[in-house]
Structures are given as C-alpha cells and as structure tokens.
Image: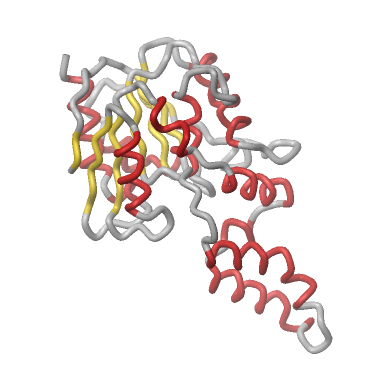
Amino acid sequence: MIEQMYTRTMFSTLVCLHGWGGSKESFTELREALQKTELKIFTPDLPGFGNEPEPGEPWTVGDYADWVTQYIRENVNEPYALLGHSHGGRIAIALVVPPPTPHSPLPTPNPSHLYLCAAAGIRRPKHVRHTLGLVAAKTGNALLSLPGLRTVKPQAKKLLYKLLRVHDYEQASKVMRQTLINVSREDMRPLLPYITVPTDIFWGIDDTMTPLQDGELMQQNIPQSTLHTYQNTRHRVHRDRAQEIAKIIQRDIETP
C-alpha cells in the first residue's frame, strides 16, 4: 500500500458508477459489505446499460459526466463520496476535476472523497491487441463475407472477437460501439494532478484490462491518494475485494 497523508471529510452518501457493460448489480457485494452502516448508497445504471436507455448519439466521457452531474443534483442532498469502477472511474475523474477543464462542472455539493476501483482512463498508445481487436471488429463483416466463409460467419466472428478480447465491442449497438471508441480515446492523465479530494485507489495485481501500472501512475499523480493492491485479484476488484473496500469506506465515515 502506498499512502499520502490527507484530511478526511465526513460523508453520509456513496454514489457508485459501474464499468462498461455493467449495471447497478455490479455493486451487490459492496452493498452487502456496507449493509451494517447507515451509509446511503446510490448505484445508477449509466446510459446504455442496465435499465437505462442508450443515448441517441455516440457519447464522450464529458457527456457521461454531465449525466451523472444531473443525477447527483436530482437525487443527492447530503455530503457524498464518489466511487467508480473501470469506465465509471474514468467518469469520476472527469467529475471531480474543477474548471477550467473542458469537462462537466462540479456537482453540488462537491464530493468529499473519491474511490477509484481499477479505473480506466490511462490511454497507452499502440496497445496492439486492443487496436487489432477494433480493426477486426470493424472489418470482420467484410472479411467473413468472402465466398466459402459466409456459412460459418456467426461462429467465426464470435471466435475472432473472443480471441481478441473485444466482447464489449461485439455486443454493443452502433451508437455504443462508437461511444466505446470515443471514451477509450480520451486520456484522463492530464487531469490527475488537479484532483483535490482525498482519494483511495483499489487495484488487483493480476488485472489485465487496466494494468497495475495505471493504478501506480494515478497514485503518483493524484496529490492526496492511497493505493491499495490485492494479490490474486483481477479487474473485478470492486466485487472480489468488496469486504476490504468496505472497511476503508467505513473507516472514512467513522473517522472525524
């Protein structure tokens, strides 16, 4: 664990933002781990996931941040903390950075604490597998429409996507596919030094979707931050380590 000293701020509500392809159900384990506290927990389905309709056109991180801002303004009336997993972490980063960034204005009231669970947002150029996967997803229809391949097109396309790990892209609608491309292109790295709220970062050492070095980079660049790492844990750190994360959150709501 890498820790920097910071002053804790009390809160009574927790807003949780799920990752790409997830929903409010992503936080079932965390809710159970926190059920003995008096913490109010909000877990909205983000647009395009769960029961929330997808947007009418492709969105950016800023668009998601605007939607969450409005959700908080309409539903949260007490001091709150913000937790984001993967894509939700990317959105949370955009939310807590004050102007003059081009992202959404801060919600009211401002979050008291930030929790990032295997947060996305660190763009690494020339990520070969991801690039090949997107190219394959875009050109797969044409390739698999060649004579002799049409009869095996559905099975071959599914296998191709599986090998290249682009399940999210395969399953998405046209709007959500472009949204995935949009948000994946955005690099949250320049925003990290401007995060002014106390931050706890949770990461699985065996995470292959958002590697540990991303968590280490976030801890190094977010001024008031602590990095918590877990052995034998991959990208589902918010679920597989819900008990440990809940203990940190409970510490924060009980410490004056």
Q: Which image quarter: residue 147?
A: bottom right
Q: Position of residue 238 (x, y in %)?
A: 34, 44
Q: Which residue is drawn at 25% across and 40% down?
A: 227
Please identify the residue farthest to the right as the structure is shown: 147
Observer-nearest residue: 217 or 34? Answer: 217
Quadrant where the image shows the N terminus: top left
In the rendered structure, the answer to whether residue 216 lies left or right of residue 194 reads: left
Observer-nearest residue: 85 or 139? Answer: 139
Q: Position of residue 221 (x, y in %)?
A: 34, 35
Observer-nearest residue: 184 or 247? Answer: 184
Q: Which image quarter: residue 119?
A: top left
In the rendered structure, the answer to whether residue 85 lies left or right of residue 75 reads: left
89, above or below 167, in the image: above
Q: Position of residue 149 (x, y in %)?
A: 76, 85
Q: Which residue is drawn at 53% across and 35% down?
A: 45
Q: Residue at x 75, y 36 (%)?
A: 56
Q: Where is residue 3 in the image (x, y as percent from the top left)?
A: 19, 35
Report the coloring of the rendering: secondary structure
Quadrant where the image shows the C terminus: top left
